[in-house]
Amino acid sequence: MAGAYISLTTEDSILSNDSVTSAMWSDNSPTLLNYYTSSAQIASAVAPYYLSVYQTASNTPTSAIQFDVAYCDEVGSGSKYLNPLVIGTTPTRTNYGQYRSLVLGDENASFIFGNYTSSYFYVLNLERARYKQSILPGTWTLQLSGSLSSTAEDHLVLTDDSLVNNVTSFTDAGRVYNIVSGSAGVVNETLNTTGWTSNVGSYGWMLPDVNLLILNGEALDATLAQGGLTLGTVRTADTWDTNGANPKLLIDSLIKGGTSPTGLAPRGFTLNSQEDLSSDFIFCRARNSEFNYSSNPSFISSSTGGILYDSFITNPTTYITTVGLYNDSQELLATAKLSRPLEKDFTKELLVRVKLDF
């Protein structure tokens, strides 16, 4: 045998990059039509900060969190004071500061949705177990409704503007796109060419790299004529509705949005995740003179130290089952198992392609 280790050259490997898309929701479903909350969570101390949304009733064995809904308010409206002696210190103000630090990286910065500065917004924070690497821009659709009307006028359908935006903007949280009226990346230009509201900017931001949808509260509260839903966000100081307040208000809008109005097919919430895979293909070659003798102890006589059978000398045959990849210190880094043993002797050469995904 020429040696137990064969050195690889630069010609023995090639790097390939691919983008893999998969459905976001549980059971690999591309569209979420039903939304459920937990009554226990609504009654808990967590509720003023966020509410979790499930694809089935939260007390069923198959239920799983799909995303969380949080309400964020710069002045702390819409929730009770954490300390009655400290005016304005509330869960909603805490939420606002948290997302301002995450997204903008500056405690004095403001959220400007399109051309409008908004002091309150809702956040859909996607559950980490639901996605691979990031949200896939230009493919998602979210439908909301302000009522259970059977007409389409009060159903708001949202997407992002990544397909028409020639310049990608970045924040401390990575890429950012405006949320606009439209479906699957196609902008609805009924009100204007941007797909924004008529008076309070865009409908928010999509941040695919941190898997957040930030919905402009003022856009949702705008009238139907202005492109909004008349959602009715509660901005009273030091108040909290035990039914879930503003987060539940938005979830109810999602539930109503899953109802099919006349003239519209059910849209619900369609979302896909994206993962960039780097694959390293390594070509491992065993030439005719290599790897024909086994390193198994049964190949060698324990008494003489010689090869046990003459046929192992004149006509050796081995069966390759595993390929090992080592570093320069001969430390094993990875192994690849073959689906079946491959016969090897002096009359055969083998080429095994090993794929490493990162």
Image (tube, helix red, strand yellow):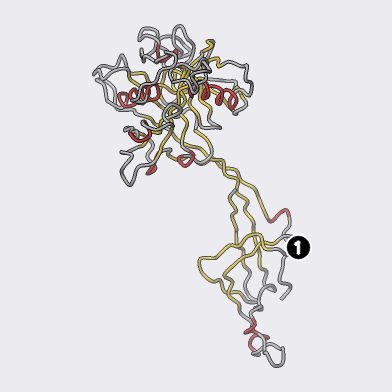
- Residue 167: image location, x then y, percent: 60, 20
Q: Is residue 328 above or below residue 242?
A: below
- Residue 213: image location, x then y, percent: 48, 26
What residue is at 40 percent from the left and 10 percent from the top?
222
What residue is at 66 percent from the left and 68 percent from the top?
286
Whether residue 171 is visible here, answered yes or no, is yes
* In the image, farthest residue toward the bottom: 303
Q: Secondary structure at mark 1?
A: loop
Q: Is 132 displayed left or right of 12 in the figure?
A: left
Q: Which three-letter amino acid code belongs to the residue tagged 1?
A: Ser
Look at the image and tell me in which quarter the N terminus lies: bottom right
Q: Is residue 176 above or below residue 153?
A: below
What residue is at 63 percent from the left and 24 percent from the top?
105
* In the image, farthest residue toward the right: 328
- In the image, 129 versus 289, the foreground residue is 129
| Mark 1 lies on residue | 329
